[in-house]
Image: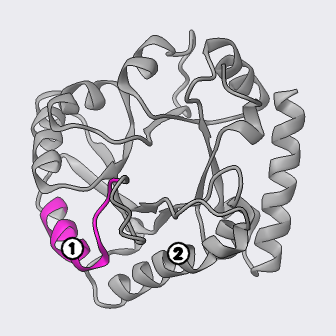
Amino acid sequence: MISENLALINRKIAEAATRAGRKPEEVRIVAAAKGQGCEKIEEALAAGIKIIGHNYLQEANKELPGKVTPDLEFHMIGHLQKNKAGKAVELFNVVQTLDDVKLAEAMNRRAEAANRMMGVMIQLNLAGEEQKSGISENEVEKLVVAIRDLPSLKLLGMMTMPPFFDDPDRARPYFGRLRELRERLMGSGILTPEMRELSMGMSGDFEVAVEEGATLVRIGTVLFGPRH
């Protein structure tokens, strides 16, 4: 079932990319594994998934696949507390939800001690929703500059989670704003070309996100089916 779901998702991504004049291979799927369990994760990997996303450290630690290949990535896609920075560095290749200088510094210390380079993305809260993590557009430049000074962190790009809408097209302005922000920061030299990733779009709106420039889409229930 997951392999069939993945084939359908890939087809929809390809169609959305084509509509936007993009190449489908520019978009990668992050399998959002929250509440899905080990069996479904293994099935997704067998179907060809290369990135597993987790919201919770404890769940990620418990659900590590039996076989980890060099091309498999683990992404933290939930909020991360500063006191969990060490465990995050141990478990993940990329933390997509960095939104604080102190957290960045803690992660850098842990990564340096572990002699590894840690991929990070800056989370933006473009709608200013109080219940969601992330910084505002006005705070981005300062955080980018701080991360660039940390030798064991590699800034890959930015992520956002728009408000929930029944109509996916209503999320389009938020996705467009993140893409425009990336282009503006690249134009000014704040972001460099390798910091181009845009993680945006989930099960209900990933096609719109792809049309607006997403390079990573975080897909859970449409891929795995309902959570346990």
Q: Is mark 1 on a helix, strand or loop?
A: helix
- Classify 10 Å Cα crowding around label 1: few (below 14), some (14-19), many (20 and above): few
Compared with 153, 192 (above or below) is below
Magenta residues, start to end:
133-147
Q: In which quarter of the image is residue 147?
A: bottom left
| Residue 3 location (% of width, % of height) | 85, 31
Tally of numbered tags: 2
Query: Residue sitting at 49 percent across and 59 percent down?
Result: 161
Q: Residue 139 carries which label?
A: 1
Q: Quadrant of residue 223?
A: top right
Question: Which of the image's four quarters has the N terminus?
Answer: top right
Q: Specify whether 137 is left or right of 148.
A: right
Mark 2 vs 1: CB contact within 8 A: no
Q: What residue type is labelled 1?
A: Glu
Query: Residue sitting at 21 percent across and 29 percent down?
Result: 84
Q: Quadrant of residue 52?
A: top right
Q: Residue 174 carries which label?
A: 2
Is tag 2's residue or tag 1's residue first in the polypeptide sequence? 1
| Residue 116 location (% of width, % of height) | 24, 35
Query: Residue sitting at 29 percent across and 24 percent down?
Result: 90
Is 139 included in the stretch rendered in magenta? yes
Question: Which of the image's four quarters has the C terminus?
Answer: top right
Query: Residue sitting at 61 percent across and 16 percent down?
Result: 37
Q: Specify whether 141 is left or right of 8.
A: left
Q: Is mark 2 on a helix, strand or loop?
A: helix
